[in-house]
Image (cartoon, rainbow, N blue to C red):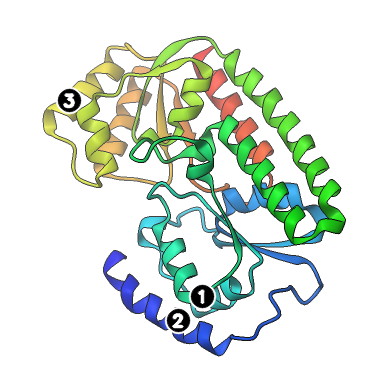
């Protein structure tokens, strides 16, 4: 709810003022890390291991960074954080506004900046395994600066995590080539890694990204690609449901075109990034093969 954010930020600032003088450390002595979503929180947890306490502001599978309504306790979390991790690229601007209002002096990792992509490109960089690898390494470096005595541990954790990502990237690259349409370009980078072409009409994708209704002709063209089986799968962001997405899913099921669900946060019960992304890769491979 974008219109409520300025008032909410002001509230955060007041709460943060009341938290001034905090210890910047978790009660159990662990390093407090705060992430915008549980996707990036899971990466921080993999690198930090038992020496960090990770809190993610968005854990709910239905959570939307564009309409996130912060809570008073968010201010305390951000004030006490030693490291904050967020997506960037315009995806989770609420987080940087809250962090600024809280006056945190924590070290920061902006995943989009780490990716090296110029501003304005697809912001869903948690689906780019090479970027996630860079972020993990950056998190290890920052944690090592905060806690030099465990620097080697963080570096080792990141190295082990990187190896799993490399294996997963190889697995994705082995998926047969094909064409798909997407309800939203969330998995753009994963499709690139797999060598799969997203042939969704640009007018459709642009409208979805701008949170407007796609032109009727764009919906018709997208539906036509499915009903005439010119694509091997429909990639669906299962956290965004509209009449248009339901229409495409229905068309895919009628035509016998597989639907591959992707998401923007970890599914319920999943806390491990590699476990989650492995399921996503396997689902895509099963649909395309």
Query: Disc 2 or disc 3, which is closer to the eye?
Result: 2
User: How far, Cα to Cα, is label 2 from label 3?
Assistant: 48 Å
Q: Which quadrant of the view contains residue 171?
A: top right
Query: Disc 1 or disc 2, which is closer to the eye?
Result: 1
Q: Is residue 43 left or right of residue 104?
A: right
User: How far, Cα to Cα, is label 1 from label 2?
Assistant: 8 Å
Residue 82 visible to the viewer: yes
Whether tag 1 and tag 2 are in contact, CB under 8 A, the answer is yes
Name the disc covering residue 13, or none: 2
**Neighbour class for label 2 at 10 Å: few (<14), some, many (≥20)?**
many
- Nearest the eye: 228 or 58: 58
Residue pointed to by mark 3: 220
In this view, 274 is above or below 32? above
Quarter of the image for the N terminus: give it.
bottom left
What kind of element bears circle 2? helix
What kind of element bears circle 3? helix
What kind of element bears circle 1? loop
């Amino acid at each position: 709810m974008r219109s409520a954010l300025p008032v909410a930020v002001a509230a955060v600032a007041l709460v943060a003022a009341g938290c001034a003088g905090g210890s910047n450390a978790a009660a159990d002595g662990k390093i407090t890390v705060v992430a915008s979503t549980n996707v990036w929180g899971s990466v921080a947890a993999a690198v930090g291991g038992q020496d960090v306490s990770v809190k993610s502001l968005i854990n709910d599978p239905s959570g939307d960074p564009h309409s996130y309504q912060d809570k008073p306790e968010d201010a305390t979390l951000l004030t006490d954080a030693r490291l904050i991790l967020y997506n960037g690229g315009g995806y989770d601007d609420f987080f940087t506004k809250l962090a600024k209002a809280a006056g945190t002096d924590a070290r920061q990792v902006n995943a989009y900046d780490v990716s090296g992509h110029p501003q304005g490109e697809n912001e869903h960089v948690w689906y780019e395994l090479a970027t996630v690898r860079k972020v993990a390494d950056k998190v290890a470096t920052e944690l090592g600066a905060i806690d030099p005595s465990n620097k080697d541990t963080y570096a080792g954790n990141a190295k082990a995590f990187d190896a799993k990502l490399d294996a997963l990237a190889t697995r994705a690259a082995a998926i047969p080539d094909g064409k798909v349409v997407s309800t939203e370009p969330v998995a753009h980078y994963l499709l690139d890694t797999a060598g799969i072409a997203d042939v969704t009409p640009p007018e459709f994708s642009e409208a979805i990204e701008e949170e407007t209704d796609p032109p009727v002709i764009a919906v018709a063209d997208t539906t036509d690609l499915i009903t005439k089986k010119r694509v091997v799968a429909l990639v669906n962001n299962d956290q965004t449901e509209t009449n248009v997405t339901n229409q495409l899913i229905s068309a895919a099921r009628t035509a016998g075109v597989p639907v591959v669900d992707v998401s923007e946060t970890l599914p319920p019960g999943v806390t491990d990034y590699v476990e989650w992304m492995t399921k996503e890769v396997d689902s895509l491979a099963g649909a395309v093969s």
